Amino acid sequence: MAGPSLRTVALNAVLAACALQAACAGVEVISGTGGALGGSDGGTMVGTGAGSGGGSTSSAILGRWTRVILLIADDGQAHESRTTWEFRQDGSAIRTVTAWNLSQGVFDTLTSVAQWSTNGSQLTVTYIAPATGTATFSYSINGDVLTVGPDQYARLR
């Protein structure tokens, strides 16, 4: 009986490395969820606030933050969704989402431009392009971990 293919061995090695990183903030591994990539897994951690008040732009949130979701679908396909936020001192923000099909080696990237502000424990993001709209989230920062609603992001250095 033949052993696993080189592709299967390589994929398993990537997944094992990713699973080791799952203990780190900003990395989440999901298995057997039907293959959908998307938002939060419904986690319960909600920030209690560490920003400055008065609608300002809290300096603690400045910089780049990333969140990675690794998904193994029921059919064995491996996917990764990586969201990176860059919060700038001038109140502008860039959100980049890259969705990978790791099994097939294809990806798609969407970049959004926004404005941001904080008020106490609330982070407000107003999207400018390509879509528009405003969303407000509870947030907190604990060291190099940014929690926005139920989602955790790791600071990029």
Image (cartoon, rainbow, N blue to C red):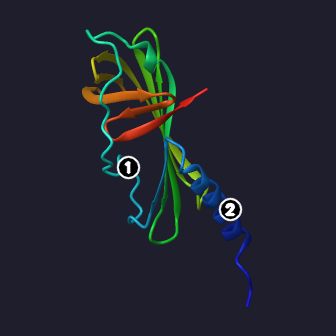
Q: Earlier in the sequence, mark 1 or mark 2?
A: 2
Query: Badge 1 is on which residue?
Result: 38
Residue 117 location in percent, x, y? 32, 16
Please tell me the numbered disc located at residue 118: none
At 47% across and 15% down in the image, what residue appears?
88
Amino acid beneath label 1 = Gly
- Front disc: 1 or 2: 2
Left or right relative to 123: residue 25: right
Whether residue 103 appears in this view of the structure is yes
At 35% across and 52% down in the image, what residue appears?
41
Mark 1 crowdedness (10 Å alpha carbons): few <14, some 14-19, many ≥20: few
- On-image quarter of the C terminus: top right
* CB contact under 8 Å: marks 1 and 2: no
Residue 6 location in percent, x, y? 74, 70
Q: How many marks?
A: 2
- Quote the CA–CA distance across marks 1 and 2: 24 Å
Residue 148 location in percent, x, y? 35, 33
- On-image quarter of the N terminus: bottom right
Left or right relative to 121: residue 24: right
Q: Secondary structure at mark 2?
A: helix
Query: Badge 2 is on which residue?
Result: 13
At 42% across and 62% down in the image, what residue appears?
35
Whether residue 130 appears in this view of the structure is no
Most foreground residue, 47 or 104 = 47
Amino acid beneath label 2 = Ala
Q: Is residue 98 above or below residue 34?
A: above
Q: Is residue 56 above or below residue 138?
A: above
Q: Secondary structure at mark 1?
A: loop
Most foreground residue, 107 or 78 = 78
